[in-house]
Image: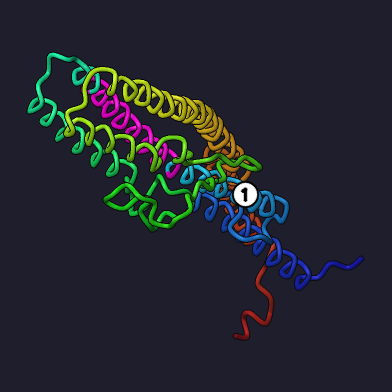
Amino acid sequence: MRVTQSMLSNNFMRNLSGSYERMAKYQEQLYTGKKVSRPSDDPVVAMKGMNYRTELTEIKQYQRNLGEIHNWMSSSDDAMDKATKTLQRLRELATQASNDTYEGDQRANIAQEVEQLRDHLIDISNTKVNNKYIFNGTDTTNPRFNENGELIAGNANNDAVNIAVSDGIVLKANTNPSNMFTEELFDNIQSFADDLKAGKTGKDLDNYIKDIDGFINDVVDERANLGARMNRLDMVEDRLSSQEITATQIMSDNEDADIEKVIMNLKTQESIHRAALSTGARIIQPSLIDFLR
């Protein structure tokens, strides 16, 4: 086979162009820190990267959902704590008022505090957090009770507010308000205040102590249920944190370039390129055409 000067020149230019492309590739990896900058560089790596990125995006969304549930549950727990303390104070007042040594004007003063505590419980039942009423089921835009302790909607909304916290896992964010705040509760407290004003004593007030104990137990039971869900929420949060770390690491292993290796490859390619230029200058000799120019 005859090898001409033109063939040598064309082959040299083709190899030189390939050398430039390889150097450009390594330089781009060094600048971006990524193995590929476009899907055509490595379709498999690009496809895996899309899947890992989608998984990481889902995890971050679930973590934002966790923040919403944490806010809801913590606010509910705080409100129920205040409700329990209010009911405990009502029990103390009922115990005091049932003592026959108290006079009429003293019981009237107790009645005034009872009414204030009743209003406070109504306010707690209409707790609003982040512009949402947390004790009215899925109807978060409207309060549950009016100022007289009557249901505004007529029918109690106890529907669960469910929020996805992981793939296939949905947690209930709210509580069942009918287990704690009812018209019966507010009517009973108002009756207690009315009987105090009417001068009733002793055994006439003892029943209110039992009723209040029942209301306290209702709040405690619902709070215990909420606490169990909060514990599970913490476990889900820990698992999501672990999944985020794992997904980030896998995505990094798939996409991020090994900088030390890239620098070494770039230096090697530069040496090869300089050697190719030097060799090409000796192989490609000037021709008659070059002199005629």
Quarter of the image for residue 91 reads top left
Placement of the N terminus among the 4 image quadrants? bottom right
Task: Give the percent coordinates (x, y) of residue 7.
Answer: 78, 70
* Observer-nearest of 125 and 146: 146
Residue 87 lies within the magenta run: yes
Q: Which residue is pictured at 62% across the width and 40% down the height? A: 169
Q: What residue occupies the far left of the structure in this picture?
A: 105
Nearest to the observer: residue 280 or residue 255: 255
Looking at the picture, how far across and down is residue 160, in whole percent? 53, 45
Q: What stretch is highlighted in magenta?
A: 68-93
Is label 1 in a helix, a strand or a loop?
helix
Q: Is residue 132 within the magenta segment? A: no
Residue 54 left/right relative to 114: right
Q: Is residue 155 left or right of residue 35?
A: left
In the rendering, at what x and y percent does residue 268 appear? 59, 44
| Quadrant (top left, top right, bottom left, bottom right) of the C terminus | bottom right
Examine the rendered structure and indicate whether residue 9 appears above or below residue 159: below
Nearest the viewer among 267 and 132 is 132
Residue 4 location in percent, x, y?
81, 70
Amino acid type assigned to the residue bearing label 1 in the image: Ile
Q: Is residue 256 visible?
A: no
Please tell me whether residue 271 is drawn above or below residue 90 in the rendered image. below
Q: Quadrant of residue 140?
A: bottom left
What residue sits 42% from the left and 37% below the top? 73
> In the rendered image, which residue does mark 1 sit on?
272
Nearer to us in this view, 159 or 230: 159
Marks counted in the figure total 1
Give the residue displayed 21% in from the left and 21% down from the top. Answer: 201
